[in-house]
Amino acid sequence: MRHSKLIAVCSLIATVLCYSSPASAAILPGDIVSSPVLISGLVEGAAFTNVTVATFSDLNPGALADYTAAIHWGDGTTSPGDITSGGGGSFTVTGSHTYADEGNYSYSTDVTFSPLPLTAIGISETAGVADAALSLLSTAPPIPFTPGVPLSNFLLATFGDANPFGSVIDFTGMIDWGDGTQTPGIILAGSPGEFALEGSHTYAGGGSFPISIGIKDTGGASLRTTTTASSRSVPEPCTLALIGIGALGLPWLRRRKVNP
């Protein structure tokens, strides 16, 4: 009789220890299954916050505080993810990030269960990051010229890039001077996200010529604008001031030039 009672007591103790042990949660690495969630609508330079990047489930769920997540964004950066519980062993991971350039990035999320050295390695998902839009800030008014006299480093247009991380190396400019001549423009950087295009040309003869200006971003965004040049124009005070600016360059421009 004593022997039977002893066996029963030992069995009860073993049962209690088994259910109270932290090791009862996520005993096997395969218990945690992580799946990526596709992120859409991304644009370079635009921050996104608290976006769902992955979900995971645990066959033997532990406490929410037992899980941590690391998001590998595919651009060389990693940041922690925020985890919320959906109940029944299901969880959601959200993250915040900013991609500095357009392109396709493969990101993944790793989930770690802390009481045990168990990690679910996330499967990669690819997010497309679109090129930020360009905006025209200003275009040179009609340009007076004298045949045979060069227009040197003349300021033709200023434009903005919605991506604050944009650089002069991202852009190319082309100028059609309207007399059958096309030349590349020079891109200059101003304040963050602001740029200018300059050009140089010499008209051989008099007349009025339509000038077409094209600016392209390596990511695909582009813009066009037009002005005119005329040997018959009479310079007004504002036009004379613009010529001075075109010749000397804007004070705020950093003179970093780019060949297309």
Image: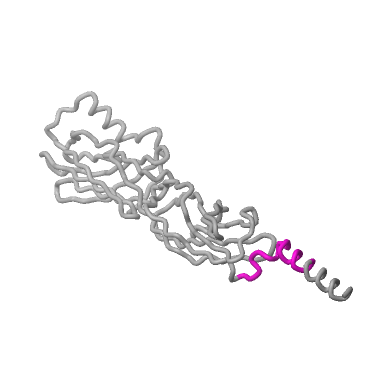
Looking at the image, which residue sits at the far front? 1
Looking at the image, which residue sits at the far top? 237
Instruction: Say which residue appears at 57% left-offset and 64% top-offset.
Output: 58
Residue 150 sits inside the magenta stretch: no
Q: Main secondary structure of the magenta part?
A: helix
> Where is residue 51 shown, x and y percent of the image?
46, 51
> Where is residue 93 shown, x and y percent of the image?
52, 55
Is residue 123 depicted above or below 148 in this figure? below
Is residue 125 depicted above or below 138 in this figure? below
Write down the quadrant of residue 18 in the picture: bottom right
Q: Quadrant of the C terminus?
A: bottom left
Q: Nearer the viewer, residue 28 or 257?
A: 28
Instruction: Say which residue appears at 71% left-offset and 62% top-offset.
Output: 22
> Where is residue 94 shown, x and y percent of the image?
50, 52
Give the magenta part as a residue range: 13-29
Instruction: Say which residue appears at 78% left-offset and 67% top-offset.
Output: 12
Asked if residue 210 lies left or right of residue 248, the reply is: left
Q: How is the image coloured?
A: one colour
Residue 24 sits inside the magenta stretch: yes
Q: Nearer the viewer, residue 169 or 145?
A: 169
Looking at the image, which residue sits at the far right? 2
Write down the quadrant of residue 153 in the picture: top left
Instruction: Say which residue appears at 25% left-offset and 37% top-offset.
Output: 139
> Where is residue 63 shown, x and y percent of the image?
64, 55
Q: Quadrant of the N terminus?
A: bottom right
